[in-house]
Amino acid sequence: MELPVVSLPDVQAHKPEIPVNLTRVGVTNVKKLIEVTRKYKRPIVLISTFDIFVDLPFNRKGANLSRNFEAVDSVIEEAVRGPVYEVEELCGAISRKLLDRHEYANRAEVRMRSEYVIKRKTPEAGATCEEVVDMIAEATAIRGKESDTIVRKVIGAEVLGITACPCAQEIMRDRAIQVLEELGVSDEVVREFLQRVPMATHNQRGRGAITIEVHDGVNVPLDKIIRIVEESMSATVYEFLKRGDEAALVNQAHRNPKFVEDCVRTMAQRVVEEFRELPGDALITIKQINEESIHRHNAFAERIATMKELREELSS
């Protein structure tokens, strides 16, 4: 005996009791395995976390969340058949697919975070070690007129580093001069000593981040972003250091003291210098958080500006 086919009600399509538009409805913390192809190198396999959203009109009770998973799975399955070179392009493809499947939505957002492993050589011994940076990719698709879809995508990274406090270093420098003078050391020797040996100061573990938002079709090299963030702090941190490496790293950091504000301004300058090809409407977000060693609080600085605004400021 065949069972009768039952038509299940689409509860999400009903009208809600409270007719209010919702900016984002979706799912978060969706884990997926992504393989990224690199030219002339082995591919990178990423365990990525996705957050996926669409907007919801006032006259619809809920979103069909299962369609979000279908969109992600179908796009990733298609991507596996061919090479994926940019993760932000993958996010853009998913966001377009979301609008196709959510006919009631006008906006779809995809956010992806992954741990990206890079190889580094230690400063003195030259030993190879692996360092982890946080990769950030996003895309927003907006339904335009006449079925056109506008896509904006974001690529960026958050990188760990070390900063040395300039203020405490100046205090220690004045103290060293005073003690050396009391010991009868000549001014010439004092000056030479201070040039050769950087003064002590307290340090912070810094977390610098740059994200760049551009129109679909504009490519931004992730490795260049990572390098800019690393080089904008006092020194790079390493998972593994021998004694000679440790001495070289501490010396480098204390010869390059930086406030949290200095890190952000350095990143801004480097972005303008190294991304000359970016359009003026590219949106740059630069952030630095320094975890203080002698305080309970952290230091924070941020700049959000278009490429055009940064270029104008730095050329004035």
Image (cartoon, grey):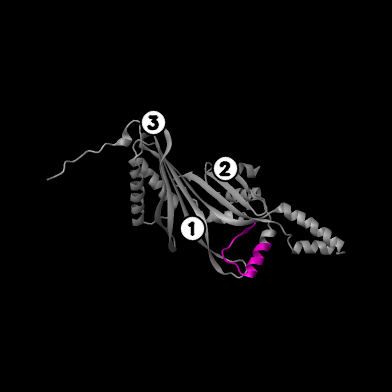
In this view, the residue farthest toward the left is 1
In terms of sequence position, does the residue under pointer 2 or pointer 1 come before the other? 1
In terms of secondary structure, where does tag 3 sit? Answer: loop
Q: Compared with residue 198, is residue 58 higher up or lower down, i.e. above or below? A: above
Residue 170 seen: yes
Q: Residue at x 54, y 68 (%)?
A: 128
Amino acid type of the residue tagged 1 in the rendering: Tyr
**Residue under pointer 3:** 58
Q: Compared with residue 169, is residue 309 higher up or lower down, i.e. above or below? A: above
For residue 214, side relative to residue 33 (left or right): right
Q: Compared with residue 159, is residue 303 higher up or lower down, i.e. above or below? A: above
Residue 143 seen: no
Q: Is residue 235 magenta?
A: yes
Q: Magenta residues, as a range?
A: 234-251
Q: Quadrant of residue 174?
A: bottom right
Q: Closest to the observer: 208 or 143?
A: 208
**Residue under pointer 1:** 116
Q: Residue at x 64, y 63 (%)?
A: 249
Q: Residue 10, position in %: x, y?
A: 29, 36
Measured Cα–Cα span from mark 2 to mark 1 = 24 Å
Q: Which circle, 2 or 3, is nearer the viewer?
A: 3
Amino acid type of the residue tagged 3 in the rendering: Phe
Q: Compared with residue 222, is residue 1 higher up or lower down, i.e. above or below? A: above
In terms of sequence position, does the residue under pointer 2 or pointer 3 come before the other? 3
In terms of secondary structure, where does tag 1 sit? Answer: strand
**Residue under pointer 2:** 304
Measured Cα–Cα span from mark 2 to mark 3 = 32 Å
Measured Cα–Cα span from mark 1 to mark 3 = 40 Å
Crowd band around label 1 with a 10 angstrom C-alpha radius: few (<14), some (14–19), many (20+)? some
Q: Is residue 284 magenta?
A: no
Amino acid type of the residue tagged 2 in the rendering: Ile
Crowd band around label 3 with a 10 angstrom C-alpha radius: few (<14), some (14–19), many (20+)? some
